[in-house]
Image (spheres, coloured by chain):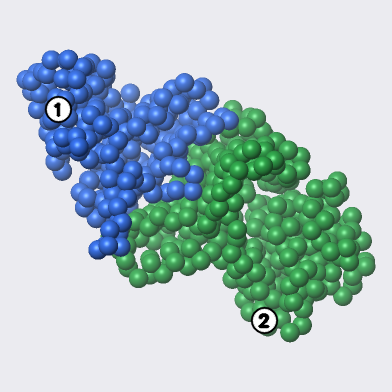
Chain colours: A blue, B green
Amino acid sequence: MLDQIKTVEEGVNKLLTIREVPIPSYTFFRKTKNDLTDLLSLDGETEKIPLPYWHYDVRIRSIWRFCRNKIDTVCCLNAYSFFGKDMTFEQALYRELDIAEFVLCAKIKKVTAFKNGDACNLIAVTDRGTLANLDFGATMANGAVNQCQHRVILQNSMVNDRVVDNQVVSHGTYVFNDSSVKPEVFDDLEVYLYGLNAEDCKMALYINALIKKSEKISEIRANHAHLLKVMDAVFRSDKTGETVEVEA
Amino acid sequence: MKPIKIAILSCNHGHARSYFGLQNDPFFDLVAVSVQPGYRDKAELYRLKDSIPKYDSDEELYAHHPDLEAVIIASANDRHLEQVRVAAAKGLHIFSMKIPSFDLNEYKEMIEVTEKAGVVCQVELEMRHHAEIMRAKDIMDSGEIGEPLSITLTNYSHNPIWWRPWQGSPEESWGKRVFLRDGDPRYRGGALADHPHIFDVVRLLSGSSFDTVFADVAPNMRDIETEDLVHISGRMKNGIIYSLDPSYANLEARVVRQVDWEIYPRIVEVTMNIVGTKGTLISDLYGKGYYFVDPRTNRYLADSPESIGIWNRRTQEFYECVRHGAKPPVGLRDHYETIAAMVAAYNSITTGKVIKM
């Protein structure tokens, strides 16, 4: 039996140690209701770094790689994503806009959005002329597993984080015992991080990459600032009932 | 029970063959079909009994069957008005394909001539007969997911234009050549024009009417004249927001007859999500698939055996209308708003604006 990793920090330190990378001074902050995502303070810097850790979701990352290599043939993204109420609307919006730009390898330049309570549907046009159709909501029970699909259509191909005929998230292991009709599920994937849940695995992998400078802090900050402008455009579009250009 | 003497006109609509089953339906007497000129070799007429005559024109069919009571108009969209006029003038009841016309003046004329003739005109909209829709409606009505906030649907399918060219012809599908928008070489009449049923589902489940419509098209997957990837979004009059994606997003083999054409494992995917204030419903509306490797093509495929009610209930309702004076679940007047919303979606693509209905 492997020792189980219990925290994101334990996971990060293990990943760094295995590769003989010195462990810097860092502090990981879980997002609060006022944050758009989880945060990291690195080397004593006071300005925290926003963590789009979903970039290390193996499926999302694979979609990005797939599209990156065929960028001139990308047509559009169709995505839906539903969250528990423990995710704020703004956090859900931030995440899905970022995923759209990440997998389409493009920046959103205008949006037409319709919001109703904690649900929102929007159509975004990117600077590459591709489209993103995003539908999402945050009304499921606290702690509910994010149910999503991100399907990119390309000329002569398609890439998706769901298998054909499957709309909800599948798991790695299902345990059907004799005391519950609902299975217990596990999503162990990374042997170095055995014990962490799926979300924390992605987080540990992202922080590991950031410390190793595979992810550039300046780019993360610039992208964060851009996403704030896209979010502003979403809210203005919903309010005015018109398409809104994202501020340059 | 007195069977209705019925004929199928043209047989080049994708759904025409779906009604070939009437030849074995005790409520109907499928007396003949006509075939669109040039389409005989693709019309899958082998599925029909030898005893059912196949004519090369409607005129010939009508001449041989003066006792006809009803027709299924299964032609390309641009022929519908002309066939409705003739059928109504003959006092024949009409079972219409899902797009009567995109020309709203033509559409109004269809309403006028059928109502003046006193004939039934029922529009086929298959999603209304899916049990999954009934379940969604029951769950919404029960309050289990709270107040509905958003209804979203996708209808992803292959593009049938290779074996059914009219669906890629702007004239035959949309009715005439109209550019999607300035500077875009594509015309109206593609994926958006083929999928009214998801618009209808939003109306049905929201219990409301379209208030605003916005649509945009992505770059095409295929080198064709009409759009194949399109997104639509907006708000219903009761505040519920919606999002529709009726794209031809699943690739197909470019064959001229509909044989060994499947590439994408599931050829038609119709899915729906409903977000309520207290939860989310995620639904596959197109039945349960089974999976196989096609020994002819070595492709991994899925197929969805349809439930009997999807097709039979529609024709059963038509029987009730013709024989017992029932009201069609979707008549021309009821369906007008769906078509108007689709026209608004095209207008939104053209103008880049949100269209207020």
Q: Residues within 10 Å of mark 1 (few under 14, many from 20)?
A: many
In this orientation, does residue A242 appear?
A: no
Residue of label 2: B325
Q: Disc 2 on helix, strand or loop?
A: loop
In the figure, residue A107 lies in which quadrant? top left
> Distance from label 1 to label 2 (Cα)?
70 Å
Q: Residue at x 56, y 29 (%)?
A: A155
Q: Residues within 10 Å of mark 2 (few under 14, many from 20)?
A: few
Which quadrant would the C terminus of chain A be assigned to in this image? Answer: top left
Give percent across and percent down for residue A87.
Answer: 22, 46
Q: Residue at x 16, y 36 (%)?
A: A4
> Of residues A22 and B243, which is closer to you in this image?
A22
In this orientation, does residue B135 appear?
A: yes
Q: Please tell me whether residue A183 is drawn above or below residue B259 in the rendered image.
A: below
Give percent across and percent down for residue B166.
Answer: 74, 44
Q: Chain of mark 2?
A: B
Query: Residue furthest toward the front?
Result: A1
Residue of label 1: A40
Give percent across and percent down for residue A85.
Answer: 23, 51
Give percent across and percent down for residue B182.
Answer: 58, 31
Q: Which three-letter amino acid code belongs to the residue tagged 2?
A: Gly
Q: Residue at x 8, y 20 (%)?
A: A25
Q: Chain of mark 1?
A: A
Q: Disc 1 on helix, strand or loop?
A: strand
